[in-house]
Image (cartoon, rainbow, N blue to C red):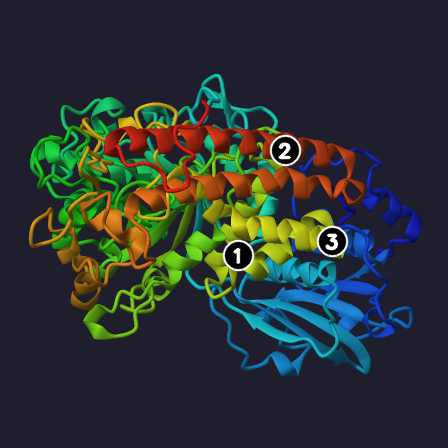
Amino acid sequence: MKTPNSRGPCRWYGLAVAAILFAVPATAETGHEAWLRYARVSAPPKSERYDGVVVAEESEVLRSAERELLRGMHQMWGLDLRSERPGFLKQPGTGFGAVIVLGTLTSIESYFPVARGTALQTDGYWLKATSVDGHPALLIAGANDRGVLYGVFALLRRIALQQTLDHLDEKQNPSAPIRWINQWDNLDGSIERGYGGRSIFFANGNVVSDLGRAQDYARLLASVGINGVVVNNVNADTRILSSDFLPQLARIAAAFQSSGIRLAIAVDFASPQKLGGLDTFDPLDPRVENWWKQKADEIYRAIPDFAGFLMKADSEGRQGPSAYGRTHAQAANAIARALKPHGGVLIYRAFVYNHHLDWNDLKADRARAAYDNFAPLDGQFDDNAIVQIKYGPIDFQVREPVSPLIGALQNTNQVLELQITQEYTGQQKHLCFLAPMWKEILNFDFRVNDANTPVKEIVSGRTFHRAWGGFVGVANVGDSDTWLGFDLAQSNLYAFGRLAWDPSLSARDIADEWTLLTFGNDPEVLHTIVDMQMESWSVYEKYTGAPLGLQTLTNIVGTHYDPGPESADGNGWGQWIRADHAGVGMDRKVATGTGLTAQYPPSVAATYESLRTCPDNLLLFFHHVPYTYILHSGKTVVQTIYDSHYDGAEQAQSFPRRWKSLQAHIDRERFEAVLIRLEGQASHAKVWRDTINNFFFKLSAIPDDKGRIPASP
């Protein structure tokens, strides 16, 4: 959306021009605008009726911030702010009753003495109600241009939520410097685990000609504080680094630029050989190091604000440093050093494990892999090399303990990997709001050195005073109208951004925000949708895995969507539950099992090691017990499995019924689209219930206390 350039001679924008620029077309609600609908809200009080906007300096991001402010003010409040040059602040015109000023702290200090001495961290912002020459003024100041843009989005969010702007004085700094999205897009336009359509970046081996959706996506991400996007699959195609492809990547970077989003790419560790023509990709070979240096130099000539590389190596068939007997630290450092002169970072995934494990080896344990591979290397990674750690030691399951590697890397930069894409949690066909799960992870206290060390403080870099830290979310948006294929799944993308910015926010507050921004402020709509969202993770866990640490009992050798408990065991993938006729669960104790518990700090390890203290919801992740074992709840394991699947399926039946109660309150397009998903979920929940319960009934030969099994297929 373009506006006339307000720099240069004074330009006054009247109502007619503003109406053309910001008119909302009378089209159906497709979900494309997501939480940036800027629906009309109550008129502001007189004290908050702004007349003009001043941008204190010139940049593409600041122009974007101004356009966003004008758009939001017009659509929500019907105000048509007029643009003025910074000189207005010295000689205010009589036409303004109040003005909003956008700029970095350094650019506004000469106009507003109150800003002198104010400190903000990188990307931080300050919203301040003040005055200039007796005229009311609202400052949106940032530590940098991105901070100003984030401040504009924060102000517009306050207006959409109908929060007062009177006496506003709010400073916000991001929790960590890395707040990235990982896309798993392939150059042919397909997306691995892509449940929202085809790629918005690639098609037929090239970058798409029209990057309008990519630009819209960048705007959505910026509105929740995301500052970087890896646009291609971690199983990277080497062509992404080819000289003829870099100009195409530069086009994506340009589409991101106005939203302050920096482009990053996933790269193949063997690229020096596969693409560069060398006879080796040994990270310690000087020719390989020089190849990476020259490639980094070439990239930064094409994309000066390039963020860096993401690497998956020695995992799931990807080549890595083990081919030459080198460590992951040596591999990461060789590439990080090529990026360092340009300010780039190398993010190296800790998702390294053997997917051909021996099922018959009772000491084999995939959950140990990340720690075993990376903990011994703590302190050996360069200062711009960052280890990316999945939240649990297995793979994005509906319930896992927190990865022990997070607490082990005390001298290494790290980022936490969360999966917005619902690979194991319903694939955007089932409602499963993930913020409650993420909050449990972020608040988990590792008790490192017997001190309070929650995950959110460790991964931010604050606990161990690391330069880099943060959050990476696997999002995989596509070209569907709703970005993720399901209107309600957008809440997970929103929640990730909000928690990456501020992990202290509550899941319910985030659900409240998202619902109000997406569906409006109707109390019945708010209450119904938020309650469903807050229940949905627990409901999904109940009818799939059971709240005992069994993970998601899906078909792990297939689509990861339908129930397939029999696929968990007897293969090399290591997502085992070791279910047999006598009992169920993985023995990961030090005393008799794989010893995973010893990877945690002593007080946490002791909790998991003992049946007496291990929480029920992780019992079967750490212990193998008989089906008749009595839980802390007083129920047996097998009866808990039966009951939870019936309870979860019954609760899922309530979702479409509750949604139908909102028919008169929600536009037809979104109402019908969501209803189809919820009805499908309710039906599929019954399939899950019967499949899992019959599986355990046949294995254990123990009847259900309530006589419900065997159930009808």
Vertical side of 374 occupied by 477: above or below = above
Q: Closer to the observer: label 3 or label 2? A: 3
Labels 3 and 2 touching (C-beta < 8 A)? no
Precedes in sequence: disc 2 or disc 1: 2
Quadrant where the image shows the C terminus: top left
Instruction: Classify mark 2: residues with Cα within 10 Å, few (<14), some (14-19) or many (20+).
Output: few
Give the percent coordinates (x, y) of residue 78: 86, 55
In the picture of the structure, the residue carrying the numbered disc 2 is 212
Quadrant where the image shows the N terminus: top right
Residue shown at the point (60%, 42%) measured from the top left: 654
Precedes in sequence: disc 3 or disc 1: 1
State the CA–CA distance, disc 2 to disc 1: 24 Å
In the picture of the structure, the residue carrying the numbered disc 1 is 498
Q: Amino acid at mark 2?
A: Gly
Residue, far top? 204
Residue shown at the point (51%, 64%) measured from the top left: 505
Judging from the image, what secondary structure is the residue with disc 3 in? helix
Give the percent coordinates (x, y) of residue 31: 68, 37
Q: Closer to the observer: label 3 or label 1? A: 3
Residue 524 image label:
3
Judging from the image, what secondary structure is the residue with disc 1 in? helix
Residue 618 image label:
none
Give the percent coordinates (x, y) of residue 457: 35, 66
State the CA–CA distance, disc 3 to disc 2: 35 Å
